[in-house]
């Protein structure tokens, strides 16, 4: 749903997204995040930089995406990315660009997403060591606090972003979906939030 920015150079992502938007006749919503699980980086041989560095790269990547999609060559010089007169083809159908969906669980990321994204996906904060979900950030109270934070950060926008919540588990009629290892131990704390959908086939509780 939200690919980590570090897996692709933003110019490559811009071209892929434009192609998908063209094939989908203008229906693409592009998700992007700063990356969260240390194991994702270790398994692919990528350095797991501190959150501030990954977020700095994400901010620049969003600038590059938005600069690459209009109808003229684009150049950019930042701390992480360089672009020299990129002339992207094809262009996306949606103008000025496909809606950006940004996911996050930390306050800094959520504030940034609230200001810049068309859709904000609220998830759980990663533990400091990057090995899983922060146990202190699971449950209804943290979710409500994040909703308030996003609304406050987006208050100055002419159009409020759409807000979504990551679904971690679905249990219908006694059968439960497979859980990501990072959240499996927090299932009970997630109950009572939109992250867990439970019910019966005849009357599901959403």
Image: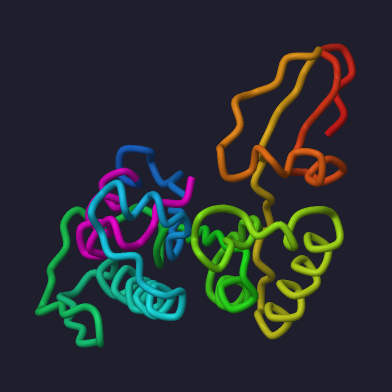
Main secondary structure type of the part rendered in magenta: helix
Where is residue 56, by image quadrant?
Answer: bottom left
Residue 12 included in the magenta stretch of the image: yes
Most foreground residue, 151 or 99: 151
Q: Is residue 89 above or below residue 106?
A: above
What residue appears at the point 77 percent right and 66 percent down from the top-left corner? 147
The magenta segment? 1-20
Residue at the location (31% across, 53% down)? Answer: 42
Residue 117: quarter of image: bottom right
Residue 64 is left or right of residue 161, and the answer is left
Task: Say left or right for 204 vs 48.
Answer: right
Q: Position of residue 33 (x, y in %)?
A: 46, 61
Image: 70 above or below 169: below
Lateral position of residue 104 relative to residue 38, left or right: right
Q: Tell whether position 55 is magenta.
A: no
Quarter that holds the C terminus = top right
């Amino acid at each position: 749903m939200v690919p980590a920015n570090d897996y692709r150079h933003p110019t490559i992502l811009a071209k892929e997204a434009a192609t998908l938007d063209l094939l989908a006749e203008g229906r693409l919503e592009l998700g992007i995040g700063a990356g969260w699980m240390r194991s994702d980086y270790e398994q692919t041989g990528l350095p797991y930089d501190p959150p501030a560095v990954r977020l700095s790269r994400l901010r620049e990547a969003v600038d590059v995406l938005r600069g690459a999609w209009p109808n003229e060559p684009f150049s950019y010089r930042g701390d992480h990315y360089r672009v020299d007169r990129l002339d992207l083809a094809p262009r996306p159908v949606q103008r000025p660009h496909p809606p950006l969906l940004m996911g996050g669980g930390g306050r800094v990321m959520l504030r940034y997403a609230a200001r810049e994204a068309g859709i904000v996906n609220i998830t759980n904060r990663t533990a400091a060591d990057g090995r899983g979900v922060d146990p202190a950030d699971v449950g209804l109270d943290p979710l409500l606090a994040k909703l308030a934070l996003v609304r406050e950060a987006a208050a100055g926008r002419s159009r409020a972003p759409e807000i979504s919540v990551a679904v971690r588990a679905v249990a219908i009629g006694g059968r439960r979906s497979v859980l990501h290892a990072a959240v499996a131990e927090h299932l009970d704390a997630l109950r009572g939030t939109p992250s867990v959908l439970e019910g019966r086939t005849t009357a599901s509780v959403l």
